[in-house]
Amino acid sequence: VSFCSSEGSSAGALLPGLFSIHIDSLNASADENSVIQKPYPDSFLLQSNADGTIASKVSIPLIAYSFYKTSSEFAPRGLALALRGGVRHYDMATDYGNSDIIAPLFQKYFKKGKIDWDFEEEKDELLQKLDLVRQKADSAYKNETKTKSFRGTEGQGRNNLFLTYKLSNAEQSTDPAAVRQTIRKLTSKFGTSYLDLVSLHSPLTGSSRRLATYKALLQMKEEGYIRSVGVCNYGVCHLKEIVENGMPLPSMNQLELSPFNTHGPIVQFCKQNNVLIGCAAWSRLSSADGPVEKWEKLGQLAKAKGVTKAQILVRWALQKGYACAPRSGTKSKLERIAIAENSYGGVVDFLLSGEEMNLLDNLNVDYKSGKLGRKDGWKEEDVKGSDWEPSAC
């Protein structure tokens, strides 16, 4: 199962309205590990003006279900199970290669508040777990408010979900019209007039393309087609480049981040500048190429808490105040159960103490993406050896 990279019947999977509870996660720090309280399931995406003042504030569920590495064959089932488990945030990208398959299901959900799915084929054990984690998540939303649609005339189903979408390097362009066309095609494909968060998937295209694309996305935000603009795998130099070109910093920076690579300087810069940190998927930390000794310590902690290693990692991210996008396929029983286990409702019943959080923080070995890259989603030509990082400056 990858880490940061989860009530209904056969008639469909339903969700209640978007919630309003939040935590001040942007100000969380490792020094506060000893006094962390039970965290709420959402935080805020802040979009700043060029002068640093806050221009907008958007509520974001901190734990998502990611379609990363989920084949088109299994993606619809993953969506159905995640919906039943009460997941509200969905992480998608052009490079995931499955948006054409899942988009029609989102369209149906936005119109009807449910998707048609035959849960009769699922095992009772799985359905019971999904229903239980949904109930636990719902109980955290006791102060929820049903919000009006951000833009357009979508039904309540649209307000229930938070959609994150990452533009591929190929979709980055110096032509604002091309970026606009990409976004309009996406909103049409998903049957919505807006996307909640649109991010550049990487800074690897070069300064002119990434800056022009980012500027075009900011304009689309002003026009209401995007609620927040983010980036992925940006280092401090890439973030400073945005400011130096007279534009506000992104709402979120998603990194390949875990206790094994905590990206201290980038995280510190983001926290100081109201940029929410997101965790992307890691799928080979437990392999022979992974940090074996450190992984064993993680396993010992998981065994002591009576949960899985993935649940420990999700909980660590949640207590740090990071947005987290666990992913899981649906081919095997373990993968399907992981959708429930790694959702907010699946990690709400245990708390990592300050000592345990410090233990996890001390697992950091700056484990570079290059050690996983050729096997974990990056193109062969992108990876520049074992010490390579996409966020390197």
Image (spheres, grey):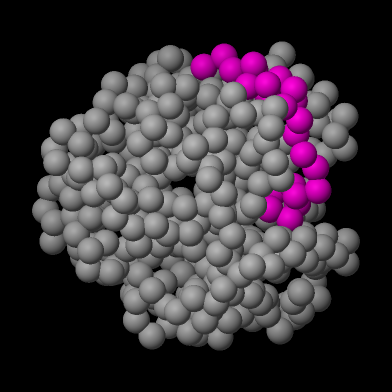
Residue 383 visible to an observer of this rendering: no
- Observer-nearest residue: 201 or 23? 23
| Residue 183 point in image, percent of width and height | 28, 63
Residue for point 61% across, 70% down: 144
Name the residue at 73% across, 55% down.
345
- Quarter of the image holding residue 186? bottom left
Residue 163 seen from this side:
yes
271 on left or right of 62? left
Image point 43% across, 82% down: which residue? 154
State left or right for residue 1 relative to residue 209.
Answer: right
Q: Position of residue 73 (x, y in %)?
A: 58, 61
Residue 15 in percent (x, y) is at 64, 74
How many badges with numbers are in the image? 0
Magenta run includes residue 21: no
Figure quadrant of the N terminus: top right
Q: Is residue 69 left or right of residue 217?
A: right
Residue 186 in the image: above or below residue 56: below
Identify the residue at horizontal 67%, vertical 75% (top origin): 13
Q: Is residue 366 above or below residue 250?
A: above
Quadrant of the snapshot with the C terminus: top left
Query: In the image, residue 127 lies at what x, y percent?
Result: 81, 66
Which image quarter: residue 58?
Answer: bottom left
Say if the magenta span includes residue 360.
Answer: yes
The answer to whether 366 is drawn above or below residue 245 in the figure is above
Q: Nearer the viewer, residue 129 or 245?
A: 245
Part of the protein shown in magenta: 342-366
229 w.r.t. 100: above or below:
above
49 and 265: which one is in front?
49
